[in-house]
Amino acid sequence: MPSSEMNKQELSAELEQVLREYNNFKARNLDLDMSRGKPSEGQIQAALGLLDAFNSKSEYKTESGINTLNYGCPDGLPECKALFADILGIDASKIFVGGNSSLNLMFDYILQCYALGASETSKPWSLQGEVKFLCPCPGYDRHFGIAEYLGIKMIPVKITETGPDMDEVEALVKDPSVKGMFCVPKYSNPTGVTYSDETVKRLAAMETADDFRIIWDNAYCIHDLFGREDTLLDMLTECEKAGNPNRAVEFASTSKISLSGAGVSVLAANAENLAYIKKRCAKQTIGHDKANQLRHVMYYKDIDGVKRHMKALSDIISPRFEVVLNAFESELGSLGIARWSKPNGGYFISLDVLDGTATRVYNLCKEAGVKLTNVGATFPYGKDPLDTNIRIAPTFPSIEELSTATELLVISIKIAALEKYINA
């Protein structure tokens, strides 16, 4: 019976039973972490062959003769650009290869726009008064951290099953002080939503300030689960078709492909944006780790090698998602006290509990030894206006740990809901 249909006596009896189950968990002194989307040890082990990609000391040169241990190629090895071009489905001429962190590339690019302008001819954002960014929510906390650090005002935008609410977006960007928008367009963090073709085209074509930029964080571009695959239009191409070729800059990395601490990042942009970015980078660095770029090329060889590896990772990750999703469905599906996403890929599940109870759920889990992502992390300034959303990260714990943590999470959701109904 749904909790909302119980009378006070039935609710109290049910709460008493669930609290007994909860206290049994507390007595176990658990110490489990579901707070961030880190790769599991199995995923790391699956990519360890990357460290042995160089079979001899003579292999540090590329086939074209580039010495990866010396200066040169500040925008990345051609071979690495070609590999990422196939991963992203774009032309290699649009790609710039960085270090191990796409977040670093993203921060530097936004800071460049803020301090110097989004192009050679545009005025720095910092000299144009208040600067605003649109933030699809629930969204990625590290995006919000960049904006908050720079003093950029964040405007939440509702995310739907097809991407951000485009009626809302198109109305907001008419304000010339709105200078940008964060997007995780495929298997969004945390909802798992992939932007529809219509959404991508509307983003590319909408009327904005000339120096408006879309931060196209394509972090989960080939991170499919369950043998399913969403498709996503190429934003750079759509912007060119719409007559706004400078509008978007794309970011990606191998952080969730190879080794998170030793991967390769890229950005992709049209010719004018790329030239402007390269001009800054020529002053910023002589070049990133080309040996690591070559190592990735030698290990994966081509897009087929990457796909085989991602299939192996999916075989590790998918069962973890199934543990959580099956528990939610069997324990919460008929109660009407929670909703959750069922993504085809990515790293997260977005969980919505009853309004006003997410913090209570978080604290109950914490007190019993399970750490969740901070409530509010999926909204600007760390404030969920409805206190309802929790980002679930299933990848890191073992299957056994995840099963235990999810069981406790379900119990905590029930407690918080029952308390709310009793006190209504």
Image (cartoon, grey):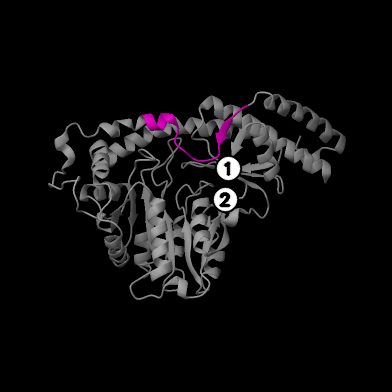
Instruction: Give coordinates of residue 377: x percent, y percent.
Output: 58, 49
User: Relative to residue 208, is residue 24 depicted above or below?
Assistant: above
61 and 96: which one is in front?
61
Is residue 31 inside the magenta stretch?
A: yes
Q: CA distance from mark 2 to mark 1?
A: 9 Å
**Quadrant in the rendering for residue 62:** top left
**Quadrant in the rendering for residue 270:** bottom left
Residue range in magenta is 30-45
User: Relative to residue 104, is residue 56 depicted above or below?
Assistant: above
Q: Amino acid at mark 2?
A: Thr
Asked if residue 332 shows in the view, the reply is: no
Asked if residue 17 shows in the view, the reply is: yes
Tag 2 and tag 1, C-beta contact below 8 Å:
yes
111 and 199: which one is in front?
111
Instruction: Give coordinates of residue 356: x percent, y percent.
Output: 72, 48
Q: Which residue corresponds to mark 2?
A: 378
N-terminal of the pair, mark 2 or mark 1, is: 1
Q: Amino acid at mark 1?
A: Thr
Label placed on residue 399: none
Residue pictured at 15% horizontal, 48% vertical:
66
